[in-house]
Image: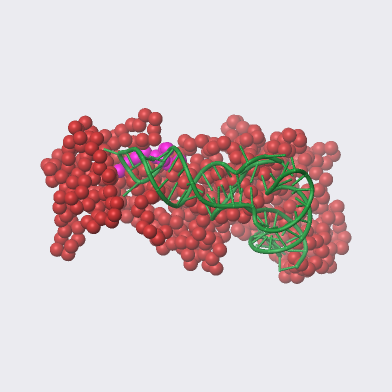
Chain colours: A red, B green
Amino acid sequence: MTVENNAAPTPAAPTDFIRDLVAQHLAEKRYDGIVTRFPPEPNGYLHIGHAKSICLNVGIALENGGRCNLRMDDTNPTKEDVEYVDSIIADVKWLVGGWADAHLAFKSKGATPEIRTINGRTDYYAAPAPAGTGTAVEPFYASDYFDALYACAVELIRRGKAYVCDLSPEDTDAYRGSPDKPGKDSPFRTRGIEESLALFERMKAGEFPNGAHSLRAKIDMASPNVWLRDPLLYRIRHADHHHTGSKWRIYPLYDFAHCLSDYFEGITHSICTLEFVDHRALYDWILESLDLARPLPHQYEFAKLNLGYTIVSKRKLLQLVQEKIVAGWDDPRMPTLSGLRRRGVPAAAVRHFAYNIGITKFDSLTDVAVFEHTIRENLNASAQRRLAVLRPVKIVLTNLAPGEVLECDAVNNPQDAQPSTRKLALTREVFIESDDFAEVPPPKYFRLKPGGEVRLKYACIIKLDEIVKDASGALIELRCTADLTTRAGGPNVDKKVKGTIHWVSASHCIDAEVRLYDRLFTVPEPAAEEDFKTCVNPHSLEVIAAKLETSLREAQAGQPFQFERLGYFTPDAKESQVGKPVFNRTISLKDTWAKPPGAK
RNA sequence: UGCUCGAUGGUGUAAUGGUAGCACAAGCGACUCUGACUCGCUUUGUCUAGGUUCGAGUCCUAGUCGGGCAGCCA
């Protein structure tokens, strides 16, 4: 069980053109209630771009007292897998948990659409699981509609609006023409209804090899919209399906399955990304061709997320996984929800980000700094502070006796209304960060330098007396004097020095592995490269052996900490154990000083 | 050069015919036992040209530039 952080509320609902439309439709009483859906294909893990869509769809449901169905858009058995189904469920629950759980809808496990008769017409309805009854639930599956979809396809054929075509895939392609040139009618376009019906049934029975026939909508081969040039509705695929097993030998295509799935579920607003704009005419055509009994859903499109220094494409992320450029879909460097979670990014921060970036139809590139800001903002409020030294340099406080232990009170989180404290042990030997010492300090260096003073946070001010090196000139230790009058309760506790640094006692600390993550790509727009893999950041992961204050030994997986002056760190959910923690750096603290001129 | 969608500071977004605002970023300063946080200040914007209007980022026309579309993927 990992510690979840959903403390920060998601900010007030934004407004955007889609929410405006929803409000308008509600005012017009176009629908009884608002139903959206999030329809991932289980062919990869969900990423930060999906989070934008989830927050939009679930957010609209939440704001309007409606629901958002989680639906597997699983019409292509050759690319899909239960591993992905499981990860999608876990990631969506994580993202929505503590925020809008009541509006994320599942169906009863094993349920298939109810078949009803409305005004003499056969109708299919896929109901959500009743709330609070404790029945087992699962996501909606487009594949649960295969029977209903088949019936709709038969109905289309009967109405003369679809036909079985025998053209090969290559010929189908050639007949389609190109955007600026009309296509050509298939010779099978005029085939009789009965013949198409019989052929379609034999396709279903598995009598033909892949590609031998297809079911096509009869629309207009000369349409300027290529998606209206008799698009395929069904293809033959002799493949088993992760959810329906070996039952089907034909599978519907996206355009046919999606609009009808929306209809079966009573979706009102079917929100998708811009690349589907051209498909909207087909979406409407299919639904309008069937004389359906209930109000029809409508499709609205928004621009998907593009994030700086990030790849937001399941296909490309899959390549990183398959080629082992990363350790898996949940590698903390991945922009997947699993990766972000493992990295220590709170779900609330992802949600906040999704709300901050807005919803438009402009294809933009969001600065990754916006995301980093929401992560820091969330963690600053929620993360307990601890002291840790990543790259230790030994200090000997010469005026402390060996074995002497001075207790110090350290604040756990200064952002808390009533900050609590914990005890830290100050001993003769301590470690400080190597960055916090400079033998030849640059200008305005506030940290430890020869003859200089610095405060050990929560302890006292120390003065550097002597730098000890070995014969080769390598640093052995720094010998300092501790001014114990500057400790809490001491007469000079208020003495000011420019620098305060973090430290850990050499005898009261633990050794732990810490993984320092940096951005996975070296360029702002890796997707725009000829080959995005050529700009993978070779320094995106550095594993170090750090010295941590002893209380960190008990850190729970998923629990966020701020290592003071360094950044936010979270025990790795897979490899960290209580007693032997392994920390992932979620994100560094903002550093407005260390940046050398001209550096990144 | 078919169809389609779009264009507001460096980035992202708001303003629904009436004072161009917010966030991030950047810069300066204050505060500080985290060079963090917080606070204050500052820089920078309506693609172009016409038109409608008392008034246009918003409406109209034309242009420019950019995105998407020709999988038996979704």
Residue A487 visible in the picture = no
Q: Is residue A457 above or below residue B8?
A: above
Foreground of the two, A579 or A359: A359
Extreme-top residue of the structure? A418
Q: Is residue A382 magenta?
A: yes
Question: Residue A390: horizontal and vertical position, in percent?
Answer: 30, 51
Residue A448 visible in the picture = yes
Residue at image location 73% in from the left, 34% down from the top = A27
Question: Residue A154: horizontal and vertical position, in percent?
Answer: 80, 52
Q: Is residue A266 above or below residue A153?
A: above
Foreground of the two, A157 or A312: A312
Question: Residue A486: horizontal and vertical position, in percent?
Answer: 20, 37
Total numbered circles: 0
Q: Is residue A211 magenta?
A: no
Relative side of B54 to A492, left or right: right
Residue at image location 22% in from the left, 56% down from the top = A439
Residue A277 is drawn in which quadrant?
bottom right
Relative side of A22 to B26, left or right: right
Relative side of A488 to A102, left or right: left
Residue at image location 53% in from the left, 58% down from the top = A311
Question: Residue A363: horizontal and vertical position, in percent?
Answer: 62, 55
Foreground of the two, A161 or A438: A438
Foreground of the two, B35 or A189: B35
Residue at image location 17% in from the left, 38% down from the top = A484
Relative side of A69 to A475, left or right: right
Residue interval drawn in magenta: A378-387
